[in-house]
Image (cartoon, grey):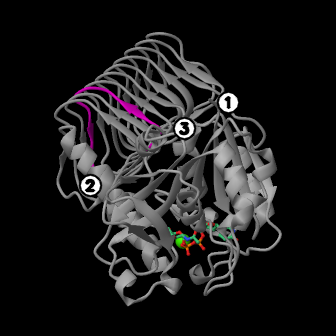
Amino acid sequence: MITHTILLAGGKGTRMLSKKAKVLQTLAGKTFLEHILLSADAISDKVSIVVGFDKHAVEKKAATILKKAKIYEQKDQIGTADAVKTVIEFVDENEKVLILYGDVPLIRKNTLKKLFSLNDSLSILTANVSNPTGYGRVLKDSNGLVQEIIEEKDTNDEQKNIKEIFTGVMAVNGKILRELIPLINNNNASKEYYLTDLIGIANGNGFKIETLSVSWEETLGANTRSEQEKLEQTYRKMKNEELLKNGITLIDKNRVDVRGDLQAGVDCTIDVNVIFEGKVELGNNVSIGANTIISNTKIGDNSEILPFSHIDSSQIGKDCFIGPYARLREGSEIADGARIGNFVETKKTKIGQSTKANHFTYLGDTEIGNDVNIGAGTITCNYDGKNKNKTEIGDGSFIGTNSSLVAPVSIGKNAYVGAGSTITKDVPDSSLGISRSKQKNVKDWSKNKK
Ligand code: UD1
Ligand code: CA
């Protein structure tokens, strides 16, 4: 059976006070749209997105996330049932349809899978919450069978006390959806076409409705900036509880942000105010110092990232020391046992085993062998105003302090560069390259000055 996900993303999200569509608001550095599409992707053969407000921006963003998603425009935002209606002629009778709301981004893939497996006609995802204000309430009869969903504005005092709410997620058979959507009217307090009326109508037509209840965290929506901040908190908590469960030490679970995927081996420790972005992999016994940002990077066993470091799209081997205050930019490959110290910036640079660059250095477009010592203040002059040029430094070499290596240039194996040199020509293996003016001492200079 084909699974077809319909994502309703037409609304403006007025209370966000934003010029953007609500699905383009962010959570953990990614748009709501991205969170939802990535959860839906794995279980959907077809994906349809209903857009309205800020439609071009939503369409553009959706294309970058999920190529297979098709866009449908809802002219006026007159209700969630009307939004589904814009897609209905593209829903086949033999499809299983999953309907998602664009402002509920924390729904898990496994939850969606479970909902699908409940029954073949109609299943809804619900949650029991202490404060149900604002949500549709799930009405059940004395046998616990679902009767209908009543929207907040249409509830009476007794119904207001119902704690089981509709999360905005349902799985429905394509045939039933096609038959029942046209029967929904707008005779309600908001004069809107409520998708939630489908439940009462289905019940009246003899279809059994199953419910799956999930924790309230997963169903949180964001209508205001304050709710968006709560989402961030909740997301952080969910992610960090997962890390703790997987055996990672967090010094403070409220002060680590995983904005992407973090994989870690055993005995890893993460200090406070650390942000992980994209895909980050830590080996065993890795420690990450405070106030560090790591994006799309792999770090080997026993390596230590010291505080205030910034690492992006790089690879770090085993037993390395990085930082404090190191900046590894894209394409930095640091081999086992190497050390990168404070105020060292690397970009598209390979650093060999046990090589050290401990202080104040820029290494760009550079290939450095094993056991090299890069003195403080060494700069690879990789840019000539037009092109980026390469620097090579062979195994066992020693680059003296405050040297400029003007690329393209190659320093051989076991070679030396004298401190303060500006190196513009290759230095052969085992040679000393030195270029600085000779020192002259003027005898009794200070005495004679007086
Ligand atoms: C909806 C449900 C409510 C549920 C809650 C869960 C209805 C009538 N009510 O209420 O039972 O408890 O979600 O969060 O469905 N949208 C469109 N076109 C429209 C209207 C809405 O695309 O004409 C989209 C919105 O962009 C949003 C989603 O549908 O992504 C839900 O709409 P929203 O107005 O936020 O519904 P709620 O009032 O939160
Ligand atoms: Ca909402």
Residue 389 image label: 1
Which callout, 1 or 2, points to the residue nearer the camera?
A: 2
Q: Does residue 179 appear to the left or right of 144 in the view shown?
A: right
Q: Is residue 292 magenta?
A: no
Quarter-of-image position of residue 43: top right
Location of residue 96 with respect to 391 vertically, above or below: below
Marks 1 and 2, how far apart at CA: 35 Å
Q: Is residue 392 above or below residue 206?
A: above
- Return the residue nearer the eye: 343 or 127: 127
Q: Earlier in the sequence, mark 1 or mark 3?
A: 3
Q: Residue 274 is drawn in which quadrant?
A: bottom left
- Depth check: give the residue in front, 255 or 418: 255
The residue labelled by disc 2 is 290
Q: Callout 1: few (<14), some (14-19), or many (20+) C-alpha neighbours within 10 Å?
A: some
Is the residue 375 above or below the residue 81 in the image?
Answer: above
Residue 311 in view in this figure: no
Counting from the top left corner in percent of width and height, residue 81 is at 68, 65
Q: Quadrant of the C terminus?
A: bottom left
C-alpha span from label 1 to label 3: 16 Å
x and y percentages locating residue 227 in the rendered image: 44, 75
Q: Is residue 313 visible?
A: yes
Disc ID at residue 330: 3
Neighbours of disc 2 within 10 Å: few (<14), some (14-19), many (20+): many
Relative depth, front residue between 212 and 434: 212
Is label 1's Cβ within 8 Å of ligand 1? Answer: no
Query: Residue 358: percent from the left, percent from the top?
Result: 33, 39
Q: Earlier in the sequence, mark 1 or mark 2?
A: 2
Q: Magenta span has 296?
A: yes
Alpha carbons under labels 3 and 2: distance apart = 21 Å
> Tag 3's secondary structure?
loop
Q: Residue at x 48, y 10 (%)?
A: 429
The range drawn in magenta is 295-307
